[in-house]
Amino acid sequence: MVGGRNAGVVGGLLRRGRQKGLTGRQEATSSDQLGKKVVVSVLGLGALTWMGGVATGDGLPESDQVWFGTRGPLSFERAVAVGPTFFCVGSGLIATFFAMRHPTKIRHIALPDQLHDHAALPLALLLAFRFQNAYDRWWTSRHSSEDLASSISSLAACAGGGIAEVHLSTEAEVDLLQRRLLLLCELFACAAEEKIHGAGLHGHPANGCPQWTTLEETLQDWPEGAAGCLASPDRVVWCATQMVWCIDRLEDLKAFGSGRAGHMHGMLGAMQQALDKCLVVCHQKSPAPFVVHLRTILLLFCATYPFTIITTVSPLLIVPAQSIVSFAFLGSEYCSQEMEHPFGDDKADIPVRQILMRARLSARAARQNLVARGLAGGAARGSDEER
C-alpha cells in the first residue's frame, strides 16, 4: 500500500514536471514568435513611412522636406561609423547565438547591468562635451570664413570708391594703384583659400564654385607681379605687403586721406585675423588623450551591452537593441569627428570657395567700375579740349 502510494506521488510529480516543461517551451516559442512579429511589423511600418514620404515630398524644396528629405530622419545621408558599428553588432550576434543554442548556460556569460548603469553617466557627459565642442568649432569656422569674406569686400569697396582730386600728373598712377589694390583683394582671397584647403583640393561637388579661378589664372591680369607672388614662400603675406604699399602710396599722393587709409589698414588686419582663426582649426586637433579615452569607453560600452540584457530580453531582440544603442552613441561620435574638421572635401564641410567668391566678385565689380569711370573721365576731358 505504501509503495503504491509513493509510486502514485512520484508519477504525479513527473506528470506535473512534464506539463511545466511543455508549458515553458510553449511560452518560449510564443515569446519568440511575438518578437518576430514585432520586428517585422516595425520594419514594415518604417518602409511604408519612407515610401509615403518620398511620394508626398516629391517636388517640394529641400527646406520643406523636414522629415523625408535629405536632412530628415529617413535620409540615407547620415553619420555611420561602419567599422565600430559592425564590431558592436557582431557582439550582439554572438550573444544571440549563445542565447538560442545554450539558453540554460547564458547566466555564466551575462554581465551585471549595474556596470553599464554606472558607466552611462560619465560616458554621456564626455560625449556631450565632445559633441558641443565640435559643433562650436564648426560654427566658429563658418563665422570666421564669413568675416574673412566681409573684410575683403569692405576693403574692396574702400579701394574702389571715389578719391580726392589729385594732380593731373599723378592721375594715371592713382588709377593704376587703385586697380592693383582691387586685384590684390582677389589674389588675397585665392591665397587664403589655398592656405586653408591646401593645393590641389577640388572639394565636394555640392560645394563647388564654377566661377572660381586659381591664383595663377588671376595673376594673368598682372603679369609684372606674377613672378614675385609665385616665388614667395607665403603668398598671403606677399599680397598683404603689396596692399599695404598701395594704400600708403595712395595716401602719399593725397588720393586717400589719413582716416581712410587707417580704416583700410584696420580691415587688412581683420582679414589676417579671420584667416588665422581658420588656420587654427585646420592645424589644431582636439587633445589626443581625451579623444582616445572617450572612444575606448564608448567602444567597450557598446560591445558589452548585449551581455547585460541577454537574460532579460528575447534572443531575437538582442541585435535590434544593440543596433539602436550602437547607432546612437557611435553616430554621435562620428558626427563630432566630422564637425571637428570643417574644412575639406566632404559635403557637410564649409563651402569656402563659395563664400570667398562673393568677395572676389565684389572686388571684380569695383575694378570694372573703376575702369568704366576712367574711360568716362577720359572722354569728358577730350570733349573739353575740343571745345
Image: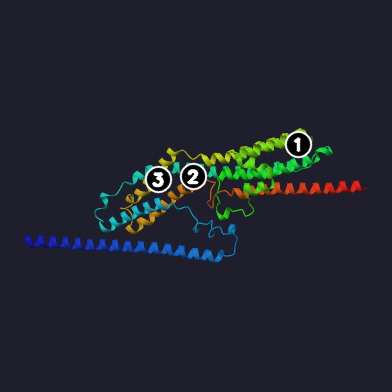
Residue 325, visible in the rendered structure: no
User: Which residue is the site of mark 3?
Assistant: 298
Mark nearer the N terminus (2 vs 3): 2
User: Which residue is the site of mark 1?
Assistant: 250
Please tell me which residue lies in front, 242 or 311. Answer: 242
Of helix, strand and loop, which one carries label 3?
helix
Please tell me which residue lies in front, 359 or 167. Answer: 167
Q: Residues within 10 Å of mark 1 (few under 14, many from 20)?
A: many
Residue 208 in the image: x percent, y percent? 59, 53
User: Which residue is the site of mark 2?
Assistant: 131
**Which amino acid lies under the numbered mark 3 shown in the image of this protein?**
Leu
Residue 384 in the image: x percent, y percent? 90, 46
Of helix, strand and loop, which one carries label 2?
helix
- With 377 as the anchor, is 67 left or right in this view? left
**Which amino acid lies under the numbered mark 2 shown in the image of this protein?**
Phe
Mark nearer the N terminus (1 vs 3): 1
Residue at image point 26% right, 61% down: 24
Residue 275, visible in the rendered structure: yes
Front position among marks 1 and 3:
1
Please tell me which residue lies in front, 130 or 18. Answer: 130
